[in-house]
Amino acid sequence: MADTDHHHDHDDTPCESALQELYLYLDGELTPQKRSIIKSHLDDCNPCFEAFDFEAELRIVISKHCRDEVPDSLRERVARELEAIDERPAEA
Ligand SMILES: [Zn+2]
């Protein structure tokens, strides 16, 4: 029962917190130190790496879309929907 080849034995960053930090990483809010901790976790941990890749691509797509033009019709629709939420009577 020597299941000691668990890859986390040399890496004390649990996947969950690594993934949480990923969001900060993508937002550029991490210190360089934390960034390198996450990077080394990603090197070791394929599931996290794939999650990172997905999130990174998502961010790139979103930021590209936002920098392009947002059609007025979409902007109006969003604004109207936000107003509708606002005007909805609160459940008493
Ligand atoms: Zn992981």
Image (tube, rainbow, N blue to C red):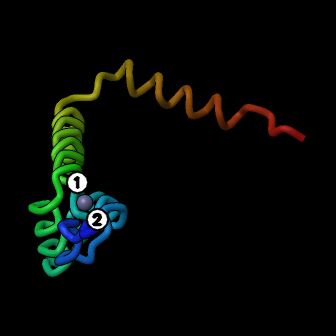
Disc 2, SS: helix
Q: Position of residue 23 (x, y in %)?
A: 30, 58
Q: Position of residue 87 (x, y in %)?
A: 71, 33
Q: Identify the residue shown where x is 24% and y is 37%.
A: 62
Density class for disc 2 (Cα within 10 Å; few <14, some 14-19, many ≥20) is some
Which corner quadrant holds the C terminus?
top right
6 or 11: which is nearer to us?
6
Task: Count the numbered circles shown.
Answer: 2
Q: Vertically, is 39 above or below 79?
A: below
Q: State whether label 2 is within 8 Å of ligand 1.
A: yes
Contact (Cβ within 8 Å) of mark 1 with mark 2: yes
Could you tell which of marks 1 and 2 lies nearer the N-terminus? 2
Which corner quadrant holds the N terminus?
bottom left
Q: State whether label 1 is within 8 Å of ligand 1.
A: yes
Asked whether, in this view, residue 42 is left or right of residue 73, the answer is left
Q: Where ligand 1 lies, by image quadrant?
A: bottom left
59 or 77: which is nearer to us?
59
Distance from disc 1 to disc 2, alpha carbons, whole Å, reads 8 Å
The residue furthest bottom is 33
Question: Quarter-wise, where is residue 89 in the image?
Answer: top right
Residue 18, numbered label: 2
Q: Identify the residue shown where x is 61% and y is 33%.
A: 83
47 or 59: which is nearer to us?
47
The residue furthest front is 1
Asked whether, in this view, residue 83 is left or right of residue 54, the answer is right
Question: Quarter-wise, where is residue 61 in the image?
Answer: top left
Residue 48, numbered label: 1
Question: Quarter-wise, where is residue 5 in the image?
Answer: bottom left
Amino acid bearing label 2: Ala
Disc 1, SS: helix
